[in-house]
């Protein structure tokens, strides 16, 4: 279903931006690509740091815009903690030089400028007005919380905070993980014969491992309510790169995709047979767009698992959370998860690869495709 949001003036438009972004940006430049009078999303960039190459910053920002098919115009909104400066010549808005360069790059690329606005702690104003005037923030219609837009009044960092989990739950998961590891070797085979006197929950965990793709599919049905032994089983799988990659591929496709990924990864591990290009392209964000609802469910699963996991077991689910966030176009969240991984294991290989991709401003191809208008 297409939702068309109409902004009758700049203040109303500023009220729409958090809905488009999914959060209320802070210390950011937000680019909104337009096709005619419509925009269907927002790109958030960090504000350029002191001493940054402003020309390169503007070129990079417009290059990202150009990848959104059908873009013929852009609106720019700066969110800053800095205050405007009053001079004899009038009001000077923060980051005016960077915005002027960015708008110039956009015009050179043939893009029409819809608006360029600045939101500060004391008010909002426009970069394109000849004599900027600071309007009260009360003019901006703040987003309302609701089931269709959870958390949009929070900033871009809020969604990357792990869920709060009490110590008792962490201890239960840790104990379950130790019991499972004591019973299994690296390949998931039993180290010793199961006697039947083990904890029934542990036996149930072993049953889950008999069909790993089915297990990965089942966790999507209750991402926030996995019992401790199921969480421990998921962590055991995540700590094995072969199964971790199968999980990511399956969550980004479907159960059949998980089965194909498991066959391909197993063949590679046993005989060095090359992984199909289709799988490699998926990990690089190429090809058909995945089901974003599945990605969001999977992200909830691995965030909950990371929050409950012993510290040493967190890099795998956190890295999976980083890839899923990146696949959803949330590069800022992905970068935060990778920071958490680096604090625990600076040499975790998949995290290093993702950091390289994000540092190069690489986003999945499907993030630039228009599927709806807002």
Image (cartoon, rainbow, N blue to C red):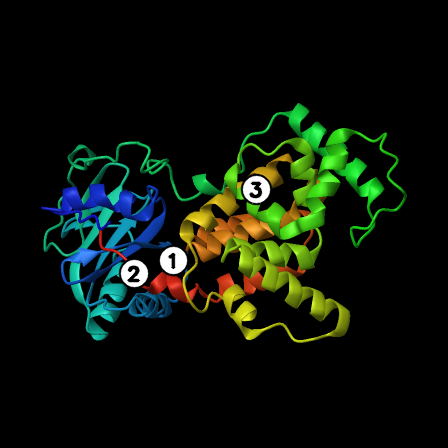
Question: Which residue does the numbered mark 2 point to in the structure image?
Answer: 98
Question: Residue 240 in the image: x percent, y percent?
Answer: 71, 54
The disc, 3 or 1, on the residue closer to the chain's N-terminal end is: 1
Query: Where residue 290 sits: x, y (%)?
Result: 43, 58
User: For numbered disc 2, what is the local secondary structure?
Assistant: helix
Name of the residue lying farthest toward the front: 196
Is there CB contact under 8 Å for labels 1 and 2? yes
Label 1 crowd bin: few (<14), some (14–19), many (20+), radius 10 Å: some
Which one is in front, 66 or 197? 197
Residue beneath the point at 34% across and 44% down: 22
**Quadrant of the rendered image containing residue 45:** bottom left
Q: What percent of the width, then of the height, locates residue 261?
A: 60, 63
User: Which residue is depicted at the point 10% across and 46% down?
Assistant: 9
> Where in the figure is residue 65, as x and y percent of width and height?
30, 65
Separation of disc 3 and disc 1 at Cα? 40 Å
Question: Residues at badges 3 and 1 in contact (C-beta under 8 Å)?
Answer: no
Mark 3 or mark 2, which is nearer to you?
3
Q: Which residue is mark 1?
A: 48
Mark 3: which secondary structure?
Answer: helix
Q: Nearer the viewer, residue 81 or 201?
A: 201
Q: Whole-Å distance between the Cαs marked 3 and 2?
A: 46 Å
Q: Residue at x 65, y 76 (%)?
A: 274
- Of mark 1 and mark 2, the one earlier in the sequence is 1
Question: Is residue 299 in view?
Answer: yes
Residue 347 lies left or right of residue 277; in this view the side is right
Judging by the rendered image, the residue that carries numbered circle 3 is 219
Q: In the drawing, does residue 326 fall left or right of residue 245?
A: left
């Amino acid at each position: 279903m297409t939702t068309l949001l109409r902004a009758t003036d700049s203040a109303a438009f500023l009220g729409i931006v958090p809905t488009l972004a999914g959060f209320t940006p802070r210390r950011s430049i937000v680019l909104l690509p337009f096709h005619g009078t419509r925009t269907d999303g927002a790109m958030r960039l960090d504000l350029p740091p002191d001493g940054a190459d402003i020309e390169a910053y503007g070129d990079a920002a417009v290059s990202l815009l150009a990848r959104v098919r059908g873009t013929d115009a852009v609106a720019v909104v700066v969110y800053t903690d800095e205050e405007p400066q009053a001079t004899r010549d009038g009001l000077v808005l923060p980051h005016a030089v960077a915005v002027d360069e960015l708008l110039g790059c956009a015009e050179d690329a043939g893009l029409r400028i819809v608006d360029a606005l600045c939101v500060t702690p004391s008010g909002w104003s426009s970069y394109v007005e000849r004599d900027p005037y600071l309007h009260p923030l009360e003019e901006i219609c703040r987003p309302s919380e609701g089931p269709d837009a959870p958390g949009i009044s929070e900033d871009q960092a809020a969604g990357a905070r792990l869920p709060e989990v009490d110590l008792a739950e962490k201890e239960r998961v840790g104990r379950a993980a130790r019991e499972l590891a004591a019973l299994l070797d690296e390949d998931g085979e039993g180290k010793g014969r199961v006697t039947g006197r083990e904890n029934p929950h542990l036996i149930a965990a072993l049953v889950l491992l008999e069909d790993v793709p089915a297990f990965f599919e089942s966790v999507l049905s209750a991402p926030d309510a996995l019992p401790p032994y199921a969480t421990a089983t998921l962590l055991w799988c995540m700590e094995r790169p072969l199964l971790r990659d199968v999980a990511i591929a399956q969550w980004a496709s479907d159960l059949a995709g998980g089965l194909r990924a498991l066959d391909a990864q197993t063949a590679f591990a046993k005989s060095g047979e090359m992984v199909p290009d289709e799988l490699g392209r998926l990990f690089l964000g190429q090809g058909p767009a995945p089901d974003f609802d599945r990605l969001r469910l999977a992200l909830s699963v691995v965030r909950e698992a990371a929050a409950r996991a012993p510290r040493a077991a967190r890099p795998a689910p956190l890295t999976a959370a980083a890839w899923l966030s990146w696949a959803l176009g949330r590069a800022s969240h992905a970068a935060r998860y990778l920071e958490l991984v680096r604090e625990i294991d600076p040499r975790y290989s998949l995290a290093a690869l993702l950091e390289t991709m994000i540092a190069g401003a690489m986003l999945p191809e499907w993030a630039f495709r228009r599927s709806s208008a807002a």
